[in-house]
Image: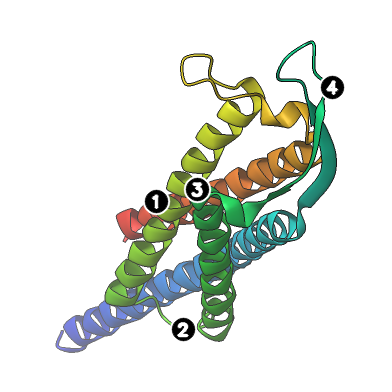
Amino acid sequence: MQLKPAATAMDGDGDGDGVRSHVKVIESARRRLRWPFDGFVRFLGLAFTLVAAVVVGVDNESKILSVTLIKSLPPIHFYASAKWQYMSAFKYFVVSNCIACAYAAVSLVYSVKTRGQKDDQMRSMLLISFDLIMVGLLFSADGAAAAIGVIGRDGNSHMHWIKVCGFFEGYCHHFTAALVISIAGSVMFLCLVVLSVLNLHKK
């Protein structure tokens, strides 16, 4: 009669240990499934921002332009060049992508080193905060650069700004490609934020 409660208690302890072991297995499997995706997305963010910064950084075009002020006079020839250093928005674009690229490299190394460790909520919140800062930084830089790009492509008749891309087509095409790549990098960081928030929500 006295052995049955003891056996029952032992069975209960065995069930509890089994549940805890199953929970540990599930948490470990979830970390293994999440890390490759997290590391892959961070690598894509690094690659996209690096390529965008390099493309704009090396992009420049120079040529001799002809402008006719008065029809009765011969055209005036002058040398002109297009470089990213000439516009504050383009400087902001290059610097922002460089910052995001450096952060992606550091966070990728950190993610690799901590992939097998137990999740820490404070550490996760810190990583989310930096990822979110990169999202805001990149999207703001992309928006500023895109606004200047639209003016360069279409001009502004009210301000008497000419269509610069009509003279520097190669420069504008390269910059457009870099802008699209940078936006893709911004989306990668946004995916990281969403992934981290969902992970915290499941805890």
Circle nearer the N terminus (4, 2)? 4
Distance in Å between CA atoms under marks 1 and 2: 29 Å
Residue sitting at 69 percent across and 47 percent down?
178
Q: What residue type is disc 3 on? A: Ala
Distance in Å between CA atoms under marks 3 and 1: 15 Å
Circle nearer the N terminus (2, 3)? 3
Residue 93 location, x and y as percent? 54, 53
Q: Mark 1 — residue?
A: 136
Q: Which mark's residue is nearer the viewer, 1 or 2?
A: 1
Distance in Å between CA atoms under marks 1 and 4: 50 Å
For the residue pair 79 and 149, the one nearer the viewer reads as 79
Distance in Å between CA atoms under marks 4 and 2: 74 Å
Q: In which quarter of the image is the C terminus?
A: bottom left
Residue sitting at 57 percent across and 66 percent down?
98
Which color scheme is applied? rainbow
- Mark 2: few, some, or many residues within 10 Å (few <14, many ≥20)? few
Q: Mark 4 — residue?
A: 74
Q: Mark 3 — residue?
A: 89
| Kind of element beneath mark 4 | loop
- Asked if the residue under mark 4 is in contact with the one under mark 3, i.e. CB atoms within 8 Å, the reply is no
Residue sitting at 56 percent across and 27 percent down?
151
- Mark 3: few, some, or many residues within 10 Å (few <14, many ≥20)? many
Q: Which mark's residue is nearer the viewer, 4 or 2?
A: 4
The reply, left or right, for residue 200 in relation to residue 65 is: left
Q: What residue type is disc 2 on? A: Gln
Q: Mark 2 — residue?
A: 117
- Asked if the residue under mark 2 is in contact with the one under mark 1, i.e. CB atoms within 8 Å, the reply is no
Q: What residue type is disc 4 on? A: Pro
